[in-house]
Image (spheres, rainbow, N blue to C red):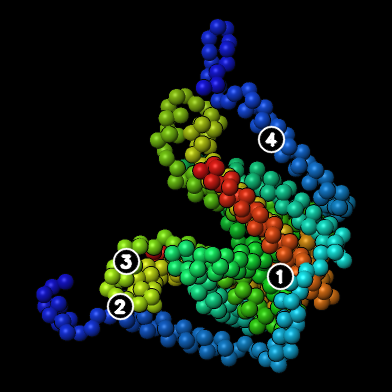
Amino acid sequence: MPVLEREGGQVWRRRTNGQNLARWFGWLLGVAVFVYCWQIISASTTWFFVWDAPRIADDIWTRATPPRWEYITQLGRPIWDTLNIATLGTIIALFLAVPVAFLAARNTTPSALIIRPIALLIIVATRSINSLIWALLLIAIIGPGVFAGVIAIAIRSIGFCAKLLYEAIEEIDQTQVEAITATGASRWQVMAYGIVPQILPAFAGIAVFRWDINIRESTVLGLVGAGGIGLQLSASLNVLAWPQVSLILIVILAAVVISEWVSAKVRGAII
Amino acid sequence: MSHRELDDMLGKGWRKPAFVKNPLLRWGLMLGFFAYLIAAYMTIEVDWGRVYEGLDRGWAFVVAFTSPDFVSRWSDIWSGLVESIVMTVAASVVGILISIPIGLGAARNIAPLPVYVICRGIVAISRALQEIIVAILLVAIFGFGPLAGFLTLSFATIGFLSKLLAEDIESMDKVQAEAIKASGARWMQWINYGVQPQVMPRLVGLSMYRIDINFRESAILGLVGAGGIGATLNTAFDRYEYDTAAAILLLIIGIVMALEYLSGIIRARVQ
């Protein structure tokens, strides 16, 4: 136990001198890295704009209020498109994520040496790239529109759903699977009666959870031209129509809050 | 199960119990789902000719992944990547530092009601607004450059980390905190010795996870002019330089994988 000799007695301390020194150097290094990063940011910032920021913010606020409420009649179709992008994207993603998850789970994969790493690579690659970047790519390939948005959301969601699902598959109760196997069931029957009933609640939860996230993401996909309410947002921003921008932001906020409420309710009912 | 029911069921084949018990609700959900699918399919306009044309370009992109071009635009890629990393580091540090007091304030068992309401309000606002939308507003206010991206990521970190930290504090073991309090500790000592040791492992794990998310998000902030690798990526897509775009995407995937591996090691050590 690290102790400090003082006035003949021993006083308890949390760390030895060496540990203290090492921690001190760790902190020094961390602070130095942070200061260096801040310097780079500061060097590429036009500070005049920053000092002017309160006035600009005030200016934008006065321009943006009150929102142009009558514009809402033109937002019905974009909201419907946004909902479609999120829902269809989630459905496609789930169809693709299920086989990937079964191939990636340690207890169901046909080959741990070859197929499992490939499935894990698919999961990591689709998960680490944002849906906006997928949308950019798909717009370059198949042209702007709702379809590009659907596919972008679908690709982005595969990794997320497959990761959560394969973790659920790895945590199943093996005794039930063994019981089904003992009846002489084939591989597919074991899957259908031993594994699927155990992961079905997790699957439904993941589906609703991802749908909620996808509603959020699909509201901004239009910024790069992939359909939905983001198209209206970017058009309004381009012509500096701030009253329309504020109305669209309110609509997006409402959509996000409602989808979160729905998802929380459904997950509460399942679990 | 009574004998009567068992007698009725004898001689009939066993059927899997349905996931949704109420048959009316089950068929209603299915019917509604299919009606929605048909409606969604009818309203999505897909230009299949354009999609078919795009398949060649899609294939060109897949081929580009096998021969990514790191060299010819290396200076652009490097400066964008450094800016992304710098924004991630600075925003994570500031965001984590701010989110700790807000997380303490948003825990009902520590904070008095007025503080609790204010802190929960901050968390709700930060979570409801999407990164890219915050970035658009901040770019309009503070001008182009990494400062807007840094502020966006810090703001998003606060909502994420404070909420999860507050939930962790709320579910902590009360006994230990009371023991510290009974020894006559001041408020700071109480937090430092009674609360902090209980939530520290989870806080470290969540912080690592958030750094990971911040890097992924920093890759798209460039699309709206908030600094980082996104601007370079967007240019590469616009100029159909798929090999450069593939190189950037591979770099992003590589860094995310490295970060995930690192955070896995750190989380295993602190827990």
The vertical placement of B37 against A117, above or below, is: below
Task: Give the letter of the chain under mark 3.
Answer: A
Residue A213 point in image, percent of width and height: 57, 67
Of circles 1 and 2, the one toward us is 2
Chain letter of disc 2? B
Q: Nearer the viewer, residue A189 or B179?
A: A189
Closer to the chain start, of discs 3 and 1, is 1
Marks 2/3 in contact by CB < 8 Å: the verdict is: no
Q: Nearer the viewer, mark 2 or mark 3?
A: 3
Check disc 1 and report the residue beneath it: A133
Label 3 – label 1 distance at C-alpha: 44 Å
**Quadrant of the rendered structure where residue A150 is?**
bottom right
| Residue highlighted by disc 3 | A178
The image quarter containing residue B15 is bottom left
Q: Residues within 10 Å of mark 1 (few under 14, many from 20)?
A: many
Q: Are marks 2 and 3 on the same chain?
A: no
Q: Which of the two residues, B199 or A54, is positioned nearer the viewer here? A: B199
| Above or below: residue B250 compared with residue B120 | below
* Disc 3 secondary structure class: helix
Q: Give the labeled residue for mark 4.
A: A26
Q: Is residue B180 above or below residue A187?
A: above
C-alpha separation, residue under disc 1 versus residue under disc 2: 43 Å
Residue B94 seen in render: yes
Amino acid type, label 1:
Ile
Q: Amino acid at mark 2?
A: Lys
Mark 3 or mark 4: whose residue is earlier in sequence: 4
Residue A266 place in picture, x, y as percent: 44, 69
Whether tag 3 and tag 1 are in contact, CB under 8 A, the answer is no
Q: What is the CA distance from the residue labelled 2 to the residue labelled 4?
A: 59 Å
Q: Nearer the viewer, residue B36 or A32?
A: A32
